[in-house]
Amino acid sequence: MYTPRTRRAFLKGMTATASAIAFSACAQEQGRNPTGLSETALAVEPIINPASLEKPNLTVGFVPVNDCAPFAIAWEKGFFRKYGLNVTLSREASWANSRDGIIFGRLDASPVVSGAVTNARTGAEGARPFPLCAAMTIHRHGNAITFNRKLWEAGIRPLSSYSGDLDKFAKDLRSYWQTAPMEDRVWATVLSSSIYEYFIRYLLSAAGINPLEELRSIITPPPQMVSNMRIEAIQAYMVAEPWNTRAIAGNEGVGFTFAQGREIWHGHPDRLLAVRESFIQDYPKTYRSLVKAMIEACQYCGNLANREEVATIISQRSFTGASIKYTRPGIVGNFNYGGFDNQPRLVNSPETTLFFDLPTSAIPHDHSTFLWQSQCLWLMTQAARWGQIAEFPKNADEIARQAWRTDLYREIAAEMGIQCPAEDYKIEPSNAFIDGKSFNPSDPVGYLQRFEIRANAPQSFFFA
């Protein structure tokens, strides 16, 4: 049923739009980009002669969220310099900018949200296909879903409080939606056709709610999430840290964390380092240097002894520009879900954000920056599930090999003395997912058909 928009709602929407435009303009200012190497970086002696590289001068993007940490560390600690690279870091206003900067040649490399590489190749949602490649995973986890205060007051609590009873969560949410206006069903993610959008839909559908029919999903740049929730333009969002921690009581006080992404899919890849396929072909030595620098930066970020320093560095104006009290929880691992009852909901875990070591993986030589092509297949199942591509690609294995360059990663890692898993595919166990459905990459179509809630799902009709 159509609900006419009130003048107040219209003004709120206009304010949100104006805010996003203003931020986009400001974020592109050169003054926000890191300039001048630190003394630590300048003291590093290159082990690769820049003259030996096809393109030693690179422009690399980043987005002002916690997962810019490896880029900040590679810059501050001289890892780019160590491998013969002269990198200019470019602060990007949004994840769409970060992806499109690579596609249109403004950036040589940049982080992208999981799903962006595969969906660029398949032309998801009608886009022109483009040969993006993932060089490595930047990090796993490090993101969360934030709900606003109205949802708290309606009786909804963090996911863990439901003890796996998704029906109870659905009942609570529907109870609120039955009395709330339609404009209170607007949830934001950072990019369409991405893992964050998939997680929002996966969560709701696991609880028996069809997100295609009962939810409006919009795209909002990360730093605008809190302000848009404050003006009630959105009721929930999924984003990387520090923008969940910033929202909770005691900070901005506009919301609470409902769930971390790792509670929806434990072990999921969040950000990938993306490049054009032609970059690998035209600059193979440069590509190897870039990946080595980023692997070493991820190892540094992954060391628990370095986490406090990492949180401090990314708080600088050139990176997130956020207070250390916002950046620290997601990096160090003392994550507070918040709430409006003055009760502590602190969860301490090194798995809050994973940059290199995987504490719970039983697979020999597994580590966070390794690219599992089976996870690329999972992302394609979700694109097909929600109608962003017409069907699961018949050549999905080929797309995964071309898109996620696990072959080159193994070679580069071996040159650094890092061992990798022997296989490209692995089964994701049932306990990794919120709905208890395991993913076997040998049968992705069968996996997809197990979901009753999906775009173009068969419907049953009953006649009296």
Image (cartoon, grey):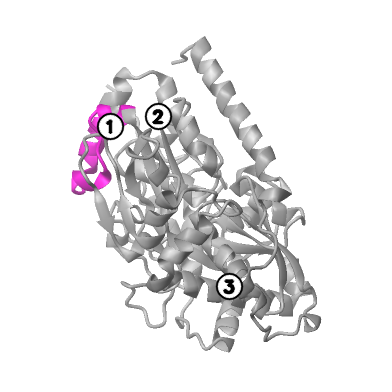
Mark 3–mark 2 Cα distance, whole angstroms, equals: 48 Å
Q: Is residue 418 above or below residue 238?
A: below
* Nearest to the observer: residue 80 or residue 111: 80
- How many numbered circles are shown? 3
Front residue of this view, candidates 108 and 420: 108
Q: Residue at x 58, y 51 (%)?
A: 317
x, y percentage for residue 271?
Answer: 52, 59
Q: Is residue 354 visible?
A: no
Does the magenta segment cover residue 169? yes
Horizontal arrangement in the rendering, residue 221 relative to residue 281 (left or right): left
Q: Earlier in the sequence, mark 1 or mark 2?
A: 1
Inspect the image, locate mark 3, and give the three-letter code of the amino acid beneath it: Lys
Q: Position of residue 140 (x, y in %)?
A: 44, 62
- Marks 1 and 3, Cα distance to the nearest angstrom? 42 Å
Residue count near mark 3 (Cα–Cα under 10 Å), binned few <14, some 14–19, many ≥20: many
Task: From the top left corner, tell me how far across and down residue 405 is, in percent.
Answer: 60, 72
Specify start and end residues of the magenta stretch as a single range. Answer: 150-173
Q: Is residue 396 above or below residue 336?
A: below
Q: Nearer the viewer, residue 249 or 155?
A: 249
- Give the residue number, with chain letter if any, for mark 3: 77
> Of the numbered discs in the image, which one, if any, rests on residue 152?
1
Q: Is disc 1 surrounded by few (<14), some (14 to 19) or many (20+) residues within 10 Å? A: some
Residue hosting label 2: 214
Q: Quadrant of residue 294?
A: bottom right
- Residue type at tag 1: Trp
Q: Tell me: 242 left or right of 406.
A: left
Callout 2 amino acid:
Glu
Q: Earlier in the sequence, mark 1 or mark 3?
A: 3
